[in-house]
């Protein structure tokens, strides 16, 4: 049973912004809205600079769904968090609740008026009929209904950004880490719950 | 007697009304659809050959998932390059 997820390999991301461009092009995202963006830490510091591509992570227990006052969010059977723009009132609660800053609001008019929320759909469209013009105009392309994966992940030149069923992409990443011999710290037990021994440091080259 | 029982039942209904508060947090169960009306990806027939990424049997979730997973494995360059 699929559970759609993104996985970003900070060891591979070269900050090319290809994923951002692919997303904007595929979904014809309006000016001022970035469903996906690349975040870089330690910018310019040799050996310490790392980048990751961030968008909606389609949380299993999504805080945006919990705080929405009009309950416009829903989750598909394959775990994609979507929303209904016909219900959204543009209040911005989801933006404050989201730890990734995924919800975006187009400037719909003068005086900072906010439009309806827009976010990554995992290229799965919205409640309108799949692959219809109405769905494309509101939510962008429905690639899952075309048997494809999100454009950002498929476009990634270094395959730093993986998208698909969580089990499948975790297997890909695990095999990659074993092959290169480092990087398991970013997804392993140690990262989630700390090192096994008190005061122990993570492996050299890995994330703390 | 009847009036007393009716009054007691009414009082109990008012007294217990607060216990009927509904859970306001969405609890997602994996694989269960609990949202708004929407068509699932596998409910559609695959589009024309030049537009589709992979093919599946309309309405068959298993075949759609295996098609998507097979496509996801295309992201595994080690397997794609070295193990063919």
Image: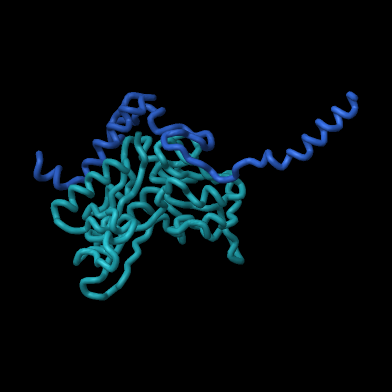
Colour style of the rendered protein structure: by chain
Instruction: Residue at 13% x, 52% y: name it.
Output: A179
Tell me the quarter of the picture where residue B18 sits: top right
Quarter holding the N terminus of chain B is: top right
Compare residues B43 and A206 and report the one nearer the observer. Answer: A206
Q: What is the x, y in percent for residue B31?
A: 42, 34
Compare residues A195 and A30 and report the one nearer the observer. Answer: A195
Q: Colour of chain A?
A: cyan
Q: What is the x, y in percent for residue B24?
A: 59, 45
Quarter holding the C terminus of chain B is: top left
Q: Is residue B9 left or right of residue B63?
A: right
Instruction: Residue at 28% x, 32% y: name it.
Output: B66
Q: Is residue A39 above or below residue A174?
A: below
Please state the total of marks drawn on the protein image. 0
* Chain coloured blue: B
Is residue A106 visible to the viewer in this orientation of the structure? Answer: no
Compare residues A23 and B19 and report the one nearer the observer. Answer: B19
Is residue A130 visible to the viewer in this orientation of the structure? Answer: yes
Q: Is residue B6 left or right of residue A15?
A: right
Q: What is the x, y in percent for residue A65?
A: 52, 48
Q: What is the x, y in percent for residue A61?
A: 46, 47
Q: Is residue A131 left or right of residue A105?
A: left
Q: Which residue is at the far bottom?
A: A45
Q: Is residue B64 above or below residue A88?
A: above
Instruction: Residue at 40% x, 37% y: name it.
Output: A78
Instruction: Residue at 30% x, 58% y: name it.
Output: A191
């Amino acid at each position: 049973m699929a559970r759609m997820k993104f996985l970003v390999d900070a060891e591979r991301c070269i900050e090319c912004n290809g994923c951002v461009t692919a997303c904007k092009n595929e979904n014809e995202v309006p000016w001022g809205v970035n469903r996906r963006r690349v975040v870089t830490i330690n910018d310019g510091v040799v050996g310490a600079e790392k980048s990751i591509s961030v968008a909606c992570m389609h949380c299993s227990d999504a805080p945006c769904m919990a705080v929405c006052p009009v309950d416009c969010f829903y989750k598909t059977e394959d775990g994609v968090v979507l929303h209904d723009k016909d219900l959204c009132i543009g209040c911005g609660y989801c933006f404050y609740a989201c730890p990734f800053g995924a919800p975006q609001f187009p400037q719909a008019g003068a005086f900072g008026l906010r439009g309806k929320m827009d976010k990554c759909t995992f290229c799965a469209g919205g409640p309108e009929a799949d692959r219809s013009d109405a769905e494309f105009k509101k939510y962008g392309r429905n690639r899952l209904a075309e048997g494809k994966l999100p454009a950002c992940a498929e476009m990634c030149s270094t395959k730093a950004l993986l998208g698909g069923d969580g089990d499948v992409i975790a297997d890909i990443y695990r095999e990659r880490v074993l092959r290169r011999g480092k990087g398991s710290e970013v997804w392993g037990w140690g990262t989630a719950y700390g090192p096994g021994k008190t005061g122990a440091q993570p492996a050299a080259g890995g994330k703390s | 007697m009847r009036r007393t029982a009716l009054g007691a039942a009414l009082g109990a209904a008012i007294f217990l009304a607060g216990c009927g508060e509904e859970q306001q947090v969405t609890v997602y169960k994996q694989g269960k659809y609990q949202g708004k009306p929407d068509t699932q990806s596998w409910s559609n027939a695959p589009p024309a050959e030049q537009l589709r990424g992979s093919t599946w049997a309309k309405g068959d979730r298993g075949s759609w998932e295996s098609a998507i997973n097979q496509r996801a494995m295309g992201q595994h360059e080690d397997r794609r390059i070295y193990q063919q």
